Amino acid sequence: MVYQAEYMWIDGTEPVSLLRSKTKILPDGADLPIWGFDGSSTNQAPGDNSDCVLKPVFDCPDPLRGPNDRLVMCEVLIPEDMSPHPTNTRSSCVEVYEKYQDQEPIFGIEQEYTLFKNGRPLGWPANGFPAPQGPYYCGIGADEVAGREIVEAHTKACIDAGLAISGTNAEVMLGQWEFQIGPLDTVSVADQVWIARYLLYRISEDFGVNASVTAKPILGDWNGAGAHTNFSTRAMRESYDAIIKACEALGQPGKPEEHIANYGTGYEERLTGLHETAHWSEFRYGVSDRGASVRIPWQVAKEGKGYIEDRRPSANMDPYTVTRMITETCCEYLAEN
Ligand code: ADP
Ligand code: MN
Ligand code: MN
Ligand code: MN
């Protein structure tokens, strides 16, 4: 007998890479082999030298197929010397994690997304706008949310896949939702966010719906979609001093610009200073402040330890890049100060 392995990887599309996947049928019990694909169709190689290598790096049960089927996250390598392809953001994430592993960095990522049908957010009228924002966040009832059947199926699939999904909620804009993955280490949280995105796209397909991680789906008085990134090290989980140092690390000269530039696209439209954001050009941290770049949750201020929330990443960010940068910036500073 055989099983199905869904190999997935991040492509080379600019400015936001796409997740790609294809199916390999393997004999029962067989290990996941190295595989390959046509990089000329994914913006990863020229047509006359098109082969790219897929190296399995994380796998879990595939809840949409059978009990023996697998979902497989891969790194993309260059065949000549099996080195990381320039689009392989995971390999440098692993390097940084290994360098600072002794500080025990962990992350929880809040992935917001918008469901679209026929080019409109789910639940929106074909023309014009729904009633203004207000009742939709954590709403209940057919007049206040749209797409719950997709959210329920996705949550169940994440649980069955063994992912560390820690919650879901309806968001401020009608048709917009969130799930959270974590807390997990720098690399694992990013592996799992990508697999959870795969499940979301794949399940939405069956409903004729497109799940989108675009940062500002509708201009105007409608919330954008972010990927708040919650972070702590062992020291931060033990002392408030380390919490403040982590915030200051992120505010060091040059760091806000460097981070924002790598936090996904559409930040100019989303980080306007309105709709629970800080303006993209300023850096500010604060307790309970949802208008800050980095928020210290009130329980953390009260207990004098815990974690911080970087509110800047766009929904379309690459989690390998975001967790690598936060780990590097904060752990380097915490080691030196
Ligand atoms: P919000 O109030 O911003 O909507 P959520 O409940 O959606 O917050 O998300 C909080 C996230 O923070 C969860 O994914 C959770 O796993 C994560 N988290 C909790 N404690 C820690 C910690 N010590 N370090 C890192 N992440 C954490
Ligand atoms: Mn949240
Ligand atoms: Mn949210
Ligand atoms: Mn949040």
Image: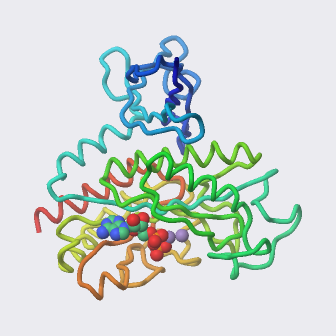
Look at the picture and state if 2 lies above or below 163. above
- Residue 190 relative to residue 304: left or right: right
Residue at x 22%, y 72% (from the top left corner)? 237
Look at the picture and state if 122 lies above or below 10. below
- Residue 193 relative to residue 231: left or right: right
Residue 228, horizontal then vertical, whole percent? 45, 65
Residue 278, horizontal then vertical, whole percent? 48, 75
Describe the colour scheme in one phrase: rainbow
Q: Residue furthest top?
A: 48
- Residue 237 relative to residue 88: left or right: left
Residue at x 52%, y 11% (from the top left corner)? 48
Quadrant where the C terminus lies?
bottom left
- The image quadrant of residue 288 is bottom left
Which one is in front, 29 or 125? 29
Q: Look at the image and tell me whether residue 279 can be seen.
A: no
Which one is in front, 70 or 172? 70
Q: Look at the image and tell me whether residue 290 can be seen.
A: yes
Residue 65, horizontal then vertical, whole percent? 59, 35
Ligand 3's image quarter is bottom right
How many numbered dots are placed on residues in this image?
Answer: 0
Residue at x 49%, y 31% (from the top left corner)? 68
Residue at x 44%, y 19% (from the top left corner)? 35
Look at the picture and state if 267 lies above or below 38. below
